Image (cartoon, rainbow, N blue to C red):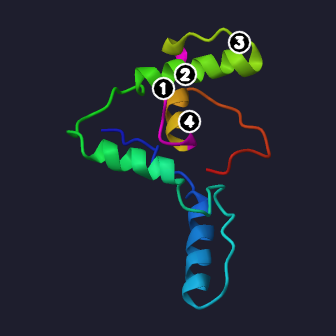
Amino acid sequence: MRHSTRGAVDPFIVMDVMEAARAAEAAGRDIVHMEVGQPGTGAPAEARAALAHALEQPLGYTVALGLPALRKRIAQHYGDWYDVDLDPARVVVTSGASGAFLLAFSALFDNDARVGLGLPCYPS
């Protein structure tokens, strides 16, 4: 039986950077976190209130491609800002770029396909 080589991928280096920053902070250094491009502040009060309200509702699985209303609004945003007529059915909401890359590459390439990547590129 042939085993997949998909697991033989270099680690996502930003995780090493995040760990080094966490260790430095734990050692008492004052760290400004800019390593992953995420906000360093808390969520706005309106977002926290919306989350608290949502958590009071019954939990369940969401639609696999993202909430239809959100997908529709994203498509509308592209029309408003870029004058692009985007069908909401072509919008997929993921939990981050890494998930989006996996979906895109899975949809675009077969298992034995050769893919060229330019440098510089997304390190993961």
Query: Looking at numbered disc 2 in the image, what kind of residue is underneath it?
Result: Arg
Return the residue nearer the eye: 106 or 98: 98
Q: Secondary structure at mark 2?
A: helix
Q: Residue at x 74, y 22 (%)?
A: 81
Q: Which residue in the structure is indicated by mark 4? A: 101
Picture disc at residue 70:
1
Between marks 4 and 1 in the image, the one whose residue lies nearer the viewer: 1
Picture disc at residue 84:
3
Q: Which residues are magenta?
A: 90-97
Q: In the figure, is residue 46 to the left or right of 116?
A: left
Above or below: residue 120 compared with residue 107: below
- Circle 4 packing at 10 Å, graded few (<14), some (14-19), many (20+), is few
Between marks 3 and 4 in the image, the one whose residue lies nearer the viewer: 3
**Residue 81 seen in this snapshot:** yes
Label 3 vs 4, first from the N-terminus: 3
Mark 4 to mark 2 CA distance (whole Å)? 22 Å
Task: For the N terminus, give its image quadrant.
Answer: top left
